[in-house]
Image (cartoon, rainbow, N blue to C red):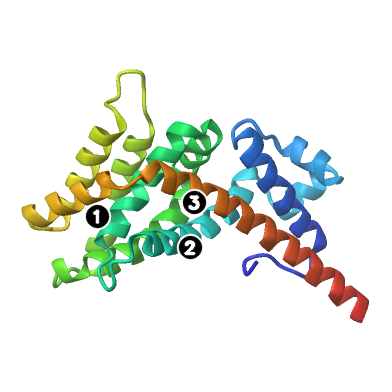
Amino acid sequence: MARVKKENPTRIMIIKTATEMFFERGFSQTTVAAVAKAAGISTGNLTFHFPTKEHILDELVKMLCDFQWRAMEEATDEGKSSLLAYCLELTTMAAISEESEQMRDFFLSAYSSPMTLESIRKNDTEKLRKVFGEYCGGWSEGQFEEAECIVSGIEYATLMTTEHSPALPERIGGALNGILLLFGIPEELRRQKLQKVLALDYRAVGRKLLEDFKKFTKEENNKAVEELLAAYKLN
């Protein structure tokens, strides 16, 4: 797990424990005190390594950003074109949020925290350049950053549903059409991508993504612990 300081066993245990609790209970329902108790440490010890639980969430958000995008590219397999992968990513996030209250809470919390939102925006700005660069010739880095602010707002609005929100296909269609239009994607190409993504079994893709990510984080955390123990044995 690249972002974990492997020389620090307490830090590893905190991330491992909190990750499992976020998935099981939801981020909002998980307290710092509960994570500390489950990890077998004091609250003060936990906050020494992570001043707030948003700092722990930030570790997980960075992992998900990388993992999710690779999964979307594999699921769409359009070669050099990443437009469909981009469309599928928001679609699966919305689908996961409808099926899992814990993941809905995770996504909304990530978009609501200034710290984690900054991580999302940094990651997504680079992604926007990759996906839409050929359609936005001459755009500066600042223009992509400004566009990402709009995009992240659309994404949050798509995930933040109420009892009067449109059904998922309508929300996705409106959100993606607006995002693609922002980057100058021609109308016919927008229509093709929207039809294609909505024809996919995106709910099944979302469920698989969630299970694969849970497995990935568990394996990465366990690997970090094993490497740490091995290092201590060598010493």
As helix, strand or loop, the secondary structure at mark 3 comes to: helix
Please tell me which residue is depicted at 29% across the width and 69% down the height of the picture.
Answer: 130
- Left or right: 170 with respect to 19? left
- Residue 47 visible here: yes
Q: How far, Cα to Cα, is label 2 from label 3?
A: 12 Å
For disc 2, the marked residue is: 66
What residue do we see at 43% from left, 54% from top?
Answer: 120
Q: Position of residue 196 (x, y in %)?
A: 22, 51
Where is residue 50? Give x, y as percent.
69, 51
Classify mark 1: residues with Cα within 10 Å, few (<14), some (14-19) or many (20+): some
Give SS at disc 2.
helix
Farthest residue, direction left = 187
Q: Which residue is mark 1?
A: 147
Query: Quadrant of the rendered structure where residue 92 is?
Result: top left
Q: Is residue 68 above or below residue 93?
A: below
Which mark's residue is nearer the viewer, 1 or 3?
Answer: 3
Measuring 29% from the left and 62% from the top, which residue is drawn there? Answer: 128
Residue 229 lies in quadrant: bottom right
First reached walking from the N terminus: tag 1 or tag 3: 1
Question: Badge 3: how crowded within 10 Å, few (<14), some, or many (20+)?
Answer: many
Q: Amino acid at mark 2?
A: Asp
Asked if one can make out residue 136 in the rendered structure from this viewpoint, the answer is no
Q: Earlier in the sequence, mark 2 or mark 1?
A: 2
Indicate the secondary structure of the residue bearing disc 1: helix
Say the numbered circle drawn on residue 209. 3
Q: Nearer the viewer, residue 92 or 104?
A: 92
Q: Residue furthest bottom?
A: 234
Question: Which one is nearer the viewer's eye here, 40 or 189?
Answer: 189
Q: Earlier in the sequence, mark 2 or mark 3?
A: 2
Query: What residue type is disc 1 on?
Result: Ala
Q: Is residue 84 above or below residue 198?
A: below
Residue 219 x/y as whole percent:
68, 60
